[in-house]
Amino acid sequence: MITYYIGNIREKRKLFRSPHEGAAVADNCDVLADFSLNGKICMVLGDIPYADMRVGEYLSYTRALKAQAPLSAESAGKLLRRVGVKVSLDKKMGSLSRFYFRGVLLAAALNDDTTEAWLNLDGIAYSTAAKMGMLAMLRRATRNFENVHVSVSDYRFIPRSANSLAVTTRGTVPGKPKSVSRRYVRLRFCKKKRRESLVLSALSGRKTVLCDG
């Protein structure tokens, strides 16, 4: 079963990072920060970590950190198939779509006894192609877990008949608050505005995803 989470970005991140028994978690570590500007929620996107590593190398590297046996190419492929990611082990991490990148993070976090997947996909701008690719990945993943929990920052990623929860500062409630992502934009501000705000100064030249608050 898939459950989608929409709502407060920071509260969702806390929820997904909290311990869950028998679960593997993939964070949105490529989202550097979020802030409110003119009534909009802005997420600051950084470069994909481990960009020069190949997918197979990254999976082997993370397994080595867990002091587990060396990971064969066959085992690495099984991990990717388990989370629904269809990419070559030779593909570089930096060339992956952001939702596939986070899918690889999920694959790296799996254990033999993992029954639940928690996948934070906040910070991905909506497009038809992104929706189709993301939902196809999730459909494949649901065959291998009892439950899959997915955080999205745009309600259009959520199929109409899907289970969904809204995460607020007061807790989690049923429903789908409308939060719509905009296309990637570069924020430009005058020198005076940048001097007034350390946040805006730090964001100079960065790409962000804008969402309705």
Image (spheres, helix red, strand yellow):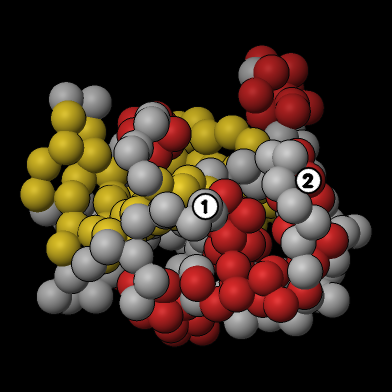
Q: Residue at x 28, y 50 (%)?
A: 6
Is 165 or 126 nearer to us in this picture?
165
Q: Is residue 109 left or right of residue 62?
A: left
- Residue 143 in the image: state x and y as whole percent: 34, 77
Q: Residue at x 80, y 50 (%)?
A: 61
Which quadrant of the rendered structure holds the C terminus?
Answer: top left
- The amino acid on which the numbered mark 2 sits, given as a three-letter code, is Ala
For the image, the number of numbered tags is: 2
Q: Earlier in the sequence, mark 2 or mark 1?
A: 2
Residue under numbered circle 2 = 64
- Answer few, some or many: residues within 10 Å of disc 1's Cα (few below 14, many 20 plus, some between 14 and 19): few
Q: Is residue 129 above or below residue 180?
A: below
Is 140 or 193 nearer to us in this picture?
140
Q: Is residue 21 above or below residue 80?
A: above
Is 123 or 13 nearer to us in this picture?
13
Could you tell me if the residues under marks 2 and 1 are in contact, i.e. CB atoms within 8 Å? Answer: no
Residue under numbered circle 1 = 111
Q: Which of the 4 quarters of the picture holds residue 204?
A: top right
| Residue 148 visible at all | yes
SS for tag 1? loop
